[in-house]
Amino acid sequence: KRLRMNRFGLTFVLVLIAFCAVLVLNDLAGAQQNEGPNVRFSWAFGALVGPANDKKLALITQDTILTTGDRLKLFVKLVNPCFVYLLHREGQGEFRLLFPSGLDQFEADYHVGKNYTIPQGNASFELDGPPGTDTFYLLASTTRLTGLEALLKSCESAGAREKQALSRRIVAEIRDLRKQNKTFSGPAERPEQIGGNVRGPDDDGIGSFPDLGPFAVEVSAKDFYGRTYTIEHQ
């Protein structure tokens, strides 16, 4: 009878240990899920709008209508170590990597807490050419987006026809990234547009662009962030 009691006691202890282990594992999983955002950076997108002699700063926070002669500038500052990409597409044309200035910048001039303006210094982009649409893609990740980088590198040496095909592949790659990381925010993509372009960088002495740093907002996300800004150029 004593032996049966010991076996029951041992079984009870083993069940209790297993139950406690499950609780601990669930707590750990919940803690991991509740960890704070690891993609964090400050960001601003500004435009100087209005007559040439009386331009005013307008912050771009959503799809926007601008006119020929309006000037654009962007600002990025890392809060946490992460990889931020800013791409521009003119209509249905090819993509340009605006930030970083080159993919090798990730191994060189790329530091938490440093202010980066796009373009650098007093330069700014200016809307010119025929009316149309420009699309800006802001992406950020805890790891480098190697598939996207490979496509961007291929564009550098591709011919005009190949660049068109590669641009479509870049759109698909961005769409896949956003599907895989369903925590992105912002308006839906509208990449297949026609028209206008952004000229620049252009530093023609028209006047300094206001410092965007004080207007920057902090962006945070878990593992990945994606946002698209569409500029209707009229």
Image (spheres, rainbow, N blue to C red):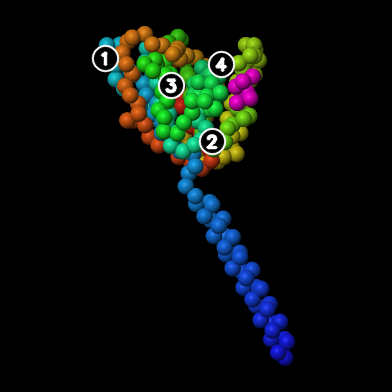
Q: Nearer the viewer, residue 177 or 213?
A: 213
Which sits earlier in the primary sequence, circle 2 or circle 3?
Answer: 3
Q: Residues within 10 Å of mark 3 (few under 14, many from 20)?
A: many
Residue highlighted by disc 2: 141
**Residue 127 visible, this angle:** no
Residues packed near mark 1 inside 10 Å, few (<14), some (14 to 19) or many (20 plus)? few
Q: What separation in Å lies between label 1 and label 2 (alpha carbons)? A: 39 Å
Quadrant assignment for the N terminus: bottom right
Task: Indicate whether residue 66 is drawn in magenta.
Answer: no
Q: Which residue is outermost to the left?
A: 54
Instruction: Check disc 2 and give the amino acid type.
Output: Ser
For mark 1, give the secondary structure.
Answer: loop
Residue drawn at 60 percent across, 27 percent down: 148
Which numbered disc, 3 or 4, marks the residue that appears first in the sequence?
A: 4
Disc with the residue nearer the chain's start (2 vs 4)? 4
Residues shaded magenta: 149-154
The C terminus lies in quadrant? top left
The residue labelled by disc 3 is: 118
Q: Residue at x 66, y 73 (%)?
A: 14
Secondary structure beneath label 4: loop
Q: Is residue 13 above or below residue 31?
A: below
Residue 74: percent from left, percent from top: 41, 24
Q: Which mark is residue 54?
A: 1
Q: Is residue 14 above or below residue 192?
A: below
Numbered disc 3: secondary structure: strand
